[in-house]
Image: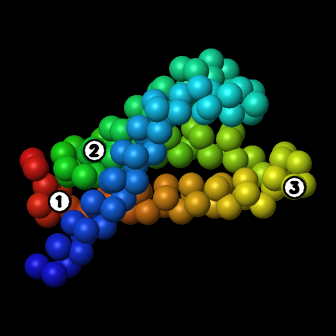
Amino acid sequence: MAYEALFLVGRLIAGSYYVMSGANHFTKWDMLTGYAKSKNVPLAKWAVLFSGLLLLLGGVSVLTGVYPQVGVLCLAAFYLGVTFKMHDFWNAPKEQQMGEKINFMKNLALLGSALMWLAIQTPWPFSLM
C-alpha cells in the first residue's frame, strides 16, 4: 500500500507538471510561437497549440490514470517532436549551448521516465477508471 501511495504522489507531481506546461502553451502562445519561429518550426503557431494539447492530454491521463498508455504516447510524441528541434544545442550559439543542452537532457529524462510507466500494470492504483 505504501508503494501505491508513493506512486500516486509521483503521478500527481508529474501530471501537474505536464498540465501546467501544456497550459503555458495556450497562455503564452505568442511568446512560444516566437521562439518556435526562431527555431524555424513550420506552422509555428499550430505546432505550439498541438504540442500544448499533447502535454495537456498526457498530463490529465497521468493525473487521473485514465488511458495511461494513450497519455504516455502523447507525452512521447511531444518529447520526440520537440526535443531535437527546439533544444538542438549542437547548433546553438556558444553562449546558449549550455541552456539548450540542459533542456535537451531534461526532456530525454522525462521521456524515459514516461516510457517506464508503460511497464506499470493497468489500471494504475487510485485511477479514476
The reply to whether dot 1 and dot 3 touch (C-beta < 8 Å) is no
Q: Is residue 118 above or below residue 10?
A: above
Q: Nearer the viewer, residue 6 or 96?
A: 96
Find residue 9 and report its horizontal and vertical position in percent: 25, 68
Which residue, given by chain and number where applicable, does mark 2 sit on? Answer: 60
Q: Label 1, label 3: how many angstroms apart (C-alpha)? A: 44 Å
Mark 3 = which residue?
95
- The first of marks 2 and 3 along the sequence is 2
What amino acid is found at the position of numbered circle 2 in the picture?
A: Val
Q: Residue at x 28, y 52 (%)?
A: 62
Q: Position of residue 27 (x, y in %)?
A: 46, 32
The residue indicated by pointer 1 is: 124
Outermost residue, bottom direction? Answer: 2
Q: Which residue appears at 53% of the width and 46% of the height?
A: 79
Q: Secondary structure at mark 2?
A: helix
What sort of colour scheme is used for the picture? Answer: rainbow
Q: Which residue is more in the foreground, 31 or 6?
A: 31
